[in-house]
Image: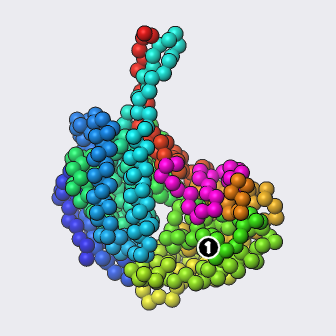
Amino acid sequence: MLTHDRLFLGGGWKEPAGRGRIEVVSPATEEVIGWVPDAATADADHAVEAARDAFDRGPWPLLDVTERMEYVRRFAAEIRERGDELADVLCAEVGLPRHTLPAGQLAKTDATFEAFLDLAADHPWEETRTGSGGRRLRVRHLPVGVVAAIVPWNAPLLITAMKLAPALLAGATVVLKPAAESPLHTYLLAEAALASGLPPGVLNILPAGPEVSEHLVRHPGVDKVSFTGSTAVGRRVGAICGGEMKRCTLELGGKSASIVLDDFELTPQGVRMLVTGAMVNSGQVCAALSRVLVPRGRYKEVVDAMAETAGALVVGDPSDPATDIGPLVSRRQRDRVERYLRIGREEGATAVVGGGRADMERGWYVQPTVFSGVDNGMTIAREEIFGPVAAVIPYEEEAEAIALANDSDYGLAGAVWTADPDRGALVAGRVRSGAVAVNAPGALDPFGPFGGLKQSGMGREGGHEGIAAYTELQTILLPAR
């Protein structure tokens, strides 16, 4: 049991205002593995007050960026030092296969901090322009203020890094709100913050339920909300922020497409990447490539290859080094995925592999599933499933593949698979998604902007754009020399 009875607020451990608890249940065993305080609205007020004080009266936003970089560099190093503990906790509370974490989420988290440190070193924090009549314009990128960073459960450490690194480097202060399913690992982040010497109030951590989360979003002391999660909740967050003229970044759901061009060589590695794109982290990825668009002339070949590869994936205990696919995060999530599996069959698709609950005594497991006979109008091709499910859709010509990829309410990610990367880049450029990879199952790189079009959100994380998202522009007008 991992139990915590205090909250990390204002640079130290504080008694919570209430006695509520958030119990964390293992998705592999269905047993309670720990608990943390369920923060009350008074705790949210305390967190914002601490962040507000650190921003308004503390030195943080006034430090030179090189000084903030040193703090963030030490913070990242302390997180790295806790890598083994973080891997154990993330495996236990989220169900991520333990053996994948060091080279997966942990390495990507470290790379994200390093990327933003590099970007901060040459970010245009201040520039001088020439205005009308020779007037000098000094354009400054000022920190946005207090940030509410709301993080989901599926890849919590990496997504936290995508928010914390640019916010802190920009000079903002942060209230981090983890998902109720995965708050345990954030106590290790708090330890890292203390060990790195981050000034009090620069980072505050608030595990809480929906009511307190909305209180945090509405709080007049919060200047910006950075939210990653479902489109439904994102709409709510965006509506609140819009009504209060509050800045927000929304990274929401997706139904991204893999476009397999007619020249793609179907090697074992290539097939595995197609399957990985749809099923990594048990398909619980907002940028999952869950629609696979295939030339009709190669349709059976691709479906059979994907089915063979998906069927060979080992579903099991996430602590077992042999496991490829761990459990879904909750009973509710498993029930949701099973409903989509049923709908897929009812609408005429065929589960050529998988299609049901995995044969496990305990835990919320679903079989890796490949559907054939899928039309782009089917529910399983339109709605985000968030499970290890790939829908393979045929097309006739390249233009139709692009049209099918774009025929979606979402526009977060995508991939193009081809023997000719230049051709792939041309096709990728016609896909209406925020990021599209060529011959790779992932479209997220911390050096480049990442975010969605349409119902996949607004704003960008990553790259210089990701830093700019935590700044406000100020122009100082000076006389001509």
Coordinates of residue 416 in the picture (x, y in percent): 67, 60
Against 117, is 210 above or below?
A: below
Residue bounds of the magenta highlight: 424-448
- How many discs appear? 1
- Could you tell me which quadrant the N terminus lies in? bottom left
Observer able to see residue 42: no
As for residue 433 lying within the magenta part, the answer is: yes
Protein image colouring: rainbow
Q: Residue at x 64, y 71 (%)?
A: 270
Coordinates of residue 221 in the picture (x, y in percent): 32, 41
Q: Residue at x 38, y 58 (%)?
A: 110
As for residue 438 lying within the magenta part, the answer is: yes
Q: Secondary structure at mark 1?
A: helix
Q: Residue at x 56, y 57 (%)?
A: 443
Against 360, is 337 above or below?
A: above
Side of 117 where 53 appears, left or right:
left
Coordinates of residue 53 in the picture (x, y in percent): 23, 40
Against 2, is 242 above or below?
A: above
Q: Quadrant of residue 25?
A: bottom left
Side of 277 where 302 appears, left or right:
right
Side of 314 where 47 appears, left or right:
left
Q: Which residue is mark 1?
A: 269
Secondary structure character of the magenta stretch overall = loop
Q: Residue at x 45, y 23 (%)?
A: 128
